[in-house]
Amino acid sequence: MEKYDIVIIGGGPAGLAAAVSARKNGIDSILILERDKELGGILNQCIHNGFGLHTFKEELTGPEYAQRFISQAQELDIAYKLNTMVMDISHDKIVTAMNREDGLFEIQAKAVILAMGCRERARGALNIPGFRPAGIYSAGTAQRLVNMEGYMPGREVVILGSGDIGLIMARRMTLEGAKVKVVSELMPYSGGLKRNIVQCLDDYGIPLKLSHTVVDIKGKERVEGVTIAEVDGKGKPIPGTEEFYSCDTLLLSVGLIPENELSGKMGVEMNPVTSGPKVNESLETNIEGVFACGNVLHVHDLVDFVSEEAAAAGKNAALYVKGEEAEAADGREIILRPVEGVRYTVPGTIHTARMDDTLTVRFRVGGVYKNCYVSVYFDEERVIHRRRQVVAPGEMEEVKLTKEQLLQYPDLKTVTFKIEDE
Amino acid sequence: MAIGMETRNLICINCPMGCPLTVEMDGRTVVRVSGNTCKRGETYAHKEVTNPTRIVTSTVRVVDGASDMVSVKTKEDIPKGMIFDCVKALQGMQVTAPIHIGDVVVADVAGTGVDVVATKNVERRP
């Protein structure tokens, strides 16, 4: 059986950044396994700009951002296999994969980095009534068809859900000559970034209807139209508010789900809120030597932060392989507790002995809060109290904790994150 | 507030931070920009209220390439009103592989003085 120090599952932005970081931290034996025919993952179909301001201080498109990391990985001579599907990872880190050249094969890894990304929530998860005609696509599928295959999925479009991919596709389809009639969002706020509402909808006069959903799809062979209705506070359609839109295409941009079938099967503990693994300060799962980063861990808005997170996972995996990972000392583990408006935190636990000087804790809020405070309590004491004009579920938040700060509280058991009015 | 003073609220689109900007204007002159967290925000606000511009991204067909399409962008931002002319100029275009990031696909697109360049490497089909 072939052996590698670190096997990385997925060659998208997270896998690439983790590989580059692991190599820079002294690991020679690294293998990336990628199921697509090229590296770069979903960035290859994200041809719009706005990537990389954080990482490279310039504004890049998705493929350009991916190429920066692909070039780095190639210069560092990192091995990868394309067109390769990972079938299984055992608890002992034996990776079973297959491709056309090697057939079915096994690799023994000392450490595994999970970087499989996420996939889109589909119509089946939404319970929309109506027929099942052609013309219903997830926004990402439409994005792949238009940007990579060169096909237009339709001419008259309605979009359900205001996730970023849906907003980006509203603009893209409009530029390619389609008429995007409306974007309907079930929630009273958009799930996408504000900048995308401005430059993808407002710029083109595409209406965004908040608290509206699709209640019927008309058409037997091909979509002929959809009925949209307003919903009440509980998400139930309000009778009498129905409006019919004729269209040949319905795009769904209704959420992303981390792709964790492999993780679950190998015994990685999951956080039900993120649908990603539970991790500690090292981004290590409950299985020693198995790390997670990027959208498989929790869905991000910015690839820049994926790269940053993945670099940390790569470094920690390198330390683990070299046996340099600090002992968790007295075994003291600080629990991070999200309450009152904060839905989750990544990581979920901290061993202070293992953490770097600063640790970025990322989280999402459960609703839109204006003129609020992001507060962090060390047990009962409030130590961080940061005023924010607005926080929203569509935009990930972060707080940096320092080791120095945490060490000042030797008996600290719980760090609580919440949103407060004052 | 003096006569002719006006405030406009914008969302900065330079990066995904999406800073909420407030632009105070006296007629057509920008008096003050606030809410931005970097210099780009201020530049954006000035442009957006006087001459709004956008980077345009699209795709072009590739002949003999490992991929059928290559992604492209305007090298710099172009006036908002020129977006559709720019996209129209790209329709039906074909380029032949190999093509590399930064290669000019259309020079001076739609008379904007801005080139459209490739944003992906597409090698020849093996």
Image (cartoon, rainbow, N blue to C red):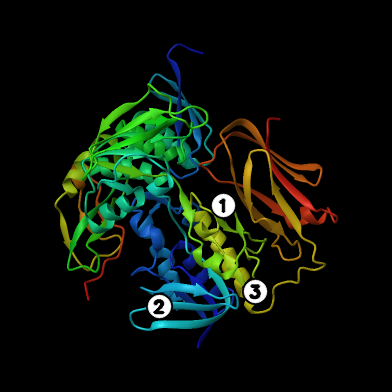
Residue A3 lies left or right of residue B85; in this view the side is: right
Q: Residue B69 versus residue A23: which sits nearer the camera?
A: B69
A356, A280: nearer the viewer = A280
* Structural crowding at the residue carrying mark 2, measured as other residues with C-alpha within 10 Å and reported as few (<14), some (14–19) or many (≥20): some
Type of amino acid under label 2: Met
Q: Is residue B47 visible?
A: no
Quadrant of residue A130 within the rendered picture: top left
Which of the two discs, 2 and 3, labels the residue nearer the N terminus? 2
Q: Position of residue B113 (x, y in %)?
A: 23, 45
In the rendered structure, are the residues bearing label 2 and label 3 in contact, judged by CB atoms less than 8 Å apart? no
Q: Chain of mark 1?
A: A
Image quarter of residue A397: top right
Q: N-terminal of the two: label 1 or label 3?
A: 1
What residue sits right under mark 2 in the picture? A98
Q: Position of residue A239 (x, y in %)?
A: 40, 23
- Give the number of the disc on residue A274: 1
Question: Callout 3: helix, strand or loop?
Answer: helix
Question: What crowding class fits label 3: few (fewer than 14 Cα within 10 Å), some (14-19), or many (20 or more)?
Answer: some
- Residue B124 at least partly seen: yes
> Neighbour class for label 1 at 10 Å: few (<14), some, many (≥20)?
many
> What's the CA distance linking mark 1 and mark 3?
26 Å
Q: Is residue A208 left or right of residue B32?
A: left
Q: Amino acid at mark 3?
A: Leu
Q: Position of residue A287 (x, y in %)?
A: 64, 70
Q: Which residue is mark 3?
A: A319
Q: Looking at the picture, which amino acid does disc 1 mark?
A: Thr
Furthest-right residue in this view: A411
Callout 3: chain? A
Image point (45%, 62%), residue name: A13
